[in-house]
Image (spheres, rainbow, N blue to C red):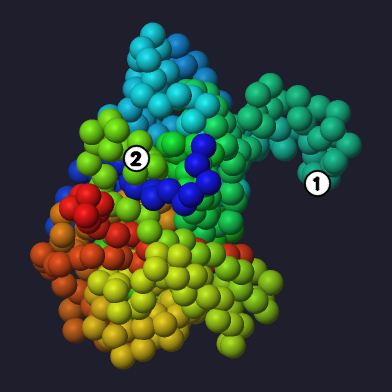
Amino acid sequence: MTTQRRRVVITGLGPICTFGIGIKPMWEGMVAGASGIRPIESYDASAFDCPLAAQLAADDFDVRKLVPKTYRKATKVMARDIALAVGGAAMAVEDAGLVTRATDPDGEPTIPPSRTGCHIGAGLIAADVNELSLAVSTSVDEDGEFDLSKWGDSGMGNLTPLWLLKYLPNMLACHVTIIHDCQGPSNTITCAEASSGLSIGESMRVISRGHADVCLSGGAECKLDPMGVLRQQFAGRLATVRDGDDPTRVVRPFMEDAGGSVLGEGGGILVLEALESARSRGVAPIAEIAGFGASQAACPDTVGLVYADDDRSVQAAITCALASADCSPEDIDAILPLGSGIPVRDAIDRRAIQDVFGDRASELPLITCVPNIGLCGAGSGALATALAAECLRRQMLPARIGEEGAETPGLDAGPIEARSAELRSILVFTTSMGGQNTALVLRRFDEEEVDG
């Protein structure tokens, strides 16, 4: 173990979103300016204000195919969120070229299990309506009202014996650590959209201070079941969709006529690794995580949808990330904010960008992904970080979609095609419902600078 601060790099990407599993389909979809937002297919959502979502196609993802045969039985107690995290971890480990217990049970692991950590962000997993309804329907009195005593006497008995294990947020990290034999520092963070960024930041610090050499880090969430959608509708976050609306143009981040967001399912796991570990095994880093910052906002609505008018917590998180990366606002070449399309949330992002970057705010290109892949809750930060890392690796900015001619005052956020760009550093920051904020500075990795 070292007492010096070690540099932390990304060596594997495992995003899962509406475009498919792995970085390749996500990147291709973003470069093409595609959108996976469409009517919800798994149930009749027509009664909701927003019956749209960015779902994975049914044939694109089967977690049973991504776990060892000996572990397939355990997939029966995986809610969708858990399955997404497990799938993301499998893709990230493969992308990083790691040998773990999952990839080769009899082989020597690339990194000792005691030096392999895991930090995964999770949301508050909504119970399956059909499972819960069966139990609730047997817990009513003669007038048809819910009776708590009946629930205790008989209702709960209609839940499957391992029902609770499907819905505990810490089960995302639990399954990933078991499958890949991660015996190092492990944690679960549940802070809405900030969960992934906070988890990545924790992994960065764990590796930096020498307590692990590799961490599987990120987050995942699916809010697309009826209870999840209803909660978001009550929170005032979703767009109101009318007949004839183009699903691919509903989410309009930073535009004057923005009217709300659309949910997505997804997230991702990244392999974070100490630079010397990556170099010792001959792996070229995708990008370096150079800086991290976090903060908590004052939210007068107590929900976290609206931050106080004088709140500067997002600016504080960004400033902290810049400082820890030993860079200034002038060193940032692109920004990937939450960009949800929710007017009050976009206003928070806008204020932070303009406060920190001043006159450069209107010139710095923003990368937006919610119009393409939906608002993925606890998975949002992992998807954003994976996308930013790929931008640095390819030296390219993906397309932005939206209405042609739409105004995004003071920001470079309007529709544009994918284009090449000289990218040295990208800022990824995420605000959340709840008031937590996180910021990461990703830097292009340059082997010559290390050797110099």
Kindly identify the residue that appears in the image at 57 percent across and 37 percent down: 186
Please identify the quarter of the rendering in which residue 50 is found: bottom left
- Three-letter amino acid code at the position of disc 2: Glu
Amino acid type of the residue tagged 1 in the rendering: Glu
Q: Nearer the viewer, residue 78 or 110?
A: 110
Query: Residue 145's mark?
Result: 1
Q: Residue at x 36, y 12 (%)?
A: 107
Residue 38 visible somewhere in the drawing: no
Q: Quadrant of the C terminus?
A: bottom left
Q: Is residue 107 visible?
A: yes
Q: Nearer the viewer, mark 1 or mark 2?
A: 2
User: Is the residue marked by circle 2 packed among few (<14), some (14-19), or many (20+) residues within 10 Å?
Assistant: some
Q: CA distance from mark 1 to mark 2?
A: 63 Å
Q: Residue furthest left?
A: 420
Mark 1 lies on a secondary structure that is: loop
At a point 77% along the width and 31% down the height, the residue shown is 155
Query: Up-down: is 439 above or below 389?
Result: below
Q: Which residue is mark 2?
A: 276
Q: Residue furthest right?
A: 149
Residue 360, percent across and down? Answer: 29, 85
x then y, percent, for residue 332: 30, 72
- Is residue 316 positioned above or below 4 on the image? below
Q: Viewed as shown, does residue 267 lie left or right of 432?
A: left
**On the picture, is 363 further left or further right than 259?**
left
Most distant residue in the top direction: 106
Say left or right for 282 vs 317.
left
- Numbered badge on residue 216: none
Q: Position of residue 84 (x, y in %)?
A: 42, 38
Tell me which label, 1 or 2, sits earlier in the chain.
1
